Image (tube, grey):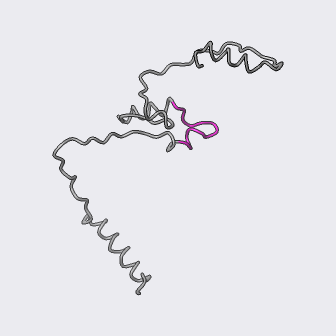
Amino acid sequence: MQGFTRRGFLWSAAATASAIATGSARAIPPIGRSRPSHMKLSLAAYSYRDLLTAKPPKMDLFDFVNLGADLGLDGSQVGSAGARQEVTDVADADARAAGEIVVDEGDGYTRVIEFLEQLKVL
């Protein structure tokens, strides 16, 4: 079995550099299509995790979604749930009201169940 030699590597590197410098290395023309593509492009927040989780963050989720819109992409995925939802509007959240402190005297679970029933979660 013959391996790759230093001389062979240098020859290949020189030939490649020469082809690039003279412009003889060209790409093929785009492949012609008989119908439009069904492929849709999007961004995934996971790919931008370094920017989103930096201290201080260099990008927030609003910047991320706006980047997708600026690039003309079809959608943005923020976690697995974001792949199935369409963002139609963005607004600041309302300020939170003061919560209720519950001291558990053995019946704390009933307070939780009552609270969830009020929210119509149960």
Q: Quadrant of residue 98?
A: top right
Which residue does the image show at 22% across and 52% down from the upper left?
Answer: 30
Vertical comparison of 9 with 27: above or below: below
| In the image, farthest residue toward the left | 34
User: Could you tell me how many numbered marks the image carries?
Assistant: 0
| In the image, farthest residue toward the bottom | 1
Front-most of 78 and 57? 78
Q: Is residue 55 magenta?
A: yes
Which residue does the image show at 74% across and 14% down from the upper left?
Answer: 100
Vertical comparison of 71 with 34: above or below: above
Front-most of 58 and 65? 65
Where is residue 87 drawn, in percent x and y?
Answer: 43, 26
Where is residue 66 drawn, in percent x and y?
Answer: 44, 30
| In the image, farthest residue toward the right | 105
Q: Quadrant of residue 105?
A: top right
Q: Quadrant of the C terminus?
A: top right
Vertical comparison of 117 with 46: above or below: above
Where is residue 67 drawn, in percent x and y?
Answer: 44, 34
SS assignment for the magenta stretch, majority:
loop
User: Magenta residues?
Assistant: 49-61
Q: Is residue 98 magenta?
A: no
Where is residue 65 drawn, in percent x and y?
Answer: 46, 31
Q: Quadrant of the N terminus?
A: bottom left
Which residue does the image show at 54% across and 32% down from the upper left?
Answer: 60
Q: Is residue 32 left or right of residue 21?
A: left
Front-most of 77 and 92? 77
